[in-house]
Amino acid sequence: MNIVAAWEAAVGRGADDFWCTLEDRRPGLLPERDAPVVFAALGRLTVGGDDPTGQAALLTVLGRAYRRHGLLPHAATIGDALLAAVARHARPLWTPQLTDAWERAGRRAAEAVRRAAARAEDGSAWCPAEVIGHDRPCDTIAILTVRPWQRLPFQPGQAVPVCTPHRPGRWRWLSPANAPCPDGTVELHVRAIAAGAVAHRLVHDVRPGELLWLGPPRDAGLCLDPSAKRDLLLVAGGTGLAPLRALVEQVAAAPDGRRVTLVVGARTFANLYDAPSLDKLQSVHNWLTVVPAFSHDPAAEPAEQGDALTIALDHHRPEDDVYVCGPPPMLAGARLRLLAAGVPADRIHLPTEMVP
């Protein structure tokens, strides 16, 4: 057995032991309702295995939790309680060697949390959100509508850490597809990928009535500049549409005379998953033009055949601010292509890399 196997044996059962041990040693340090989330996140951080963006989401949540509850002076006590809970549930295969390995990993995790807490802002570390809608417009994509128990203070274009109890301790970034609504609901677009355990569960397993956890929003490089009123060229690929649709809704909430062109890339017409919402937006706003771009659909109109960025450059005007969001292959050469097409560097907006 290694520490990963030990953690997997404890993750679904050890949270109560963790909190009871912590409460015995430091009464009132951590509210019981928050213990399962801290237990799962800290354990996951200790055993590792997340990609850098997943680790960044996890540390955003843990750093805020440690700051909010004043946990940093008690990091050693929390680490000891975590170790005790994991060791208990990994018996009888737990060994002194595993204790040593866990303690070394725990020290690295504690230092990462300390740095994250130093960067964290005040406020709630997470809030539960009820899934009230789960639509599957195609096999690999889900549109989730969730209602947070408290209003989520996000801006269009930001990203939010999201966790499902189906995969405790694993947090992933998602960008809301809407501007803040009067009823507080948030729409999330998720694509299931082979290596995405959280995304797979959100697409295939989560159902209305279940809860998710939403962490604190963070700038993702796609928010509108409040001082700029230039026209917008928005270029979306796949579920990269979500934050860009939120920008359209932000403009719609306070029209300021700017025109918006939204180019939506998909392989074929069948993959254009959010077409009803886009049609509705375009029908009620005469300043909005939605342009589909189909990379593998021979039945598409000639002006709509090609990758999203190529089609977008046909619609670019010198006064546009350009926002691009999509899968990594699309983003990899986007800046160079836009610069080569004459778009000034300060008019190009791409997602920032979410790293610890």
Image (spheres, grey):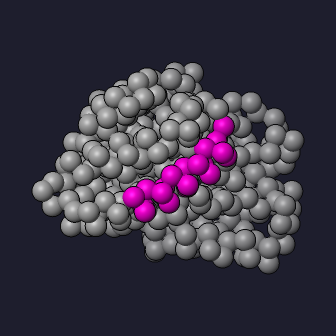
Range of magenta residues: 103-121
Relative to residue 42, is residue 280 drawn left or right?
Answer: right
Relative to residue 56, is residue 170 drawn left or right?
Answer: left
Q: Quadrant of the C terminus?
A: bottom right
Q: Is residue 118 magenta?
A: yes
Q: In terms of depth relative to the viewer, which is nearer, 42 or 49? A: 42
Image coordinates of residue 88 in percent, x first then y, are: 21, 47
Regarding residue 191, the answer to whether it shows in the image is: no
Q: Quadrant of the N terminus?
A: bottom left
**Which residue corresponds to the image point at 36% horizontal and 28% vertical from the top-left?**
23
**Which residue corresponds to the image point at 28% horizontal and 55% vertical from the top-left?**
7
**Which residue corresponds to the image point at 24% horizontal and 58% vertical from the top-left?**
6
- Above or below, 166 against 186 in this view is below
Image coordinates of residue 129 in percent, x first then y, are: 42, 31
Q: In terms of depth relative to the viewer, which is nearer, 76 or 278? A: 76
Q: In terms of depth relative to the viewer, which is nearer, 282 or 273? A: 273
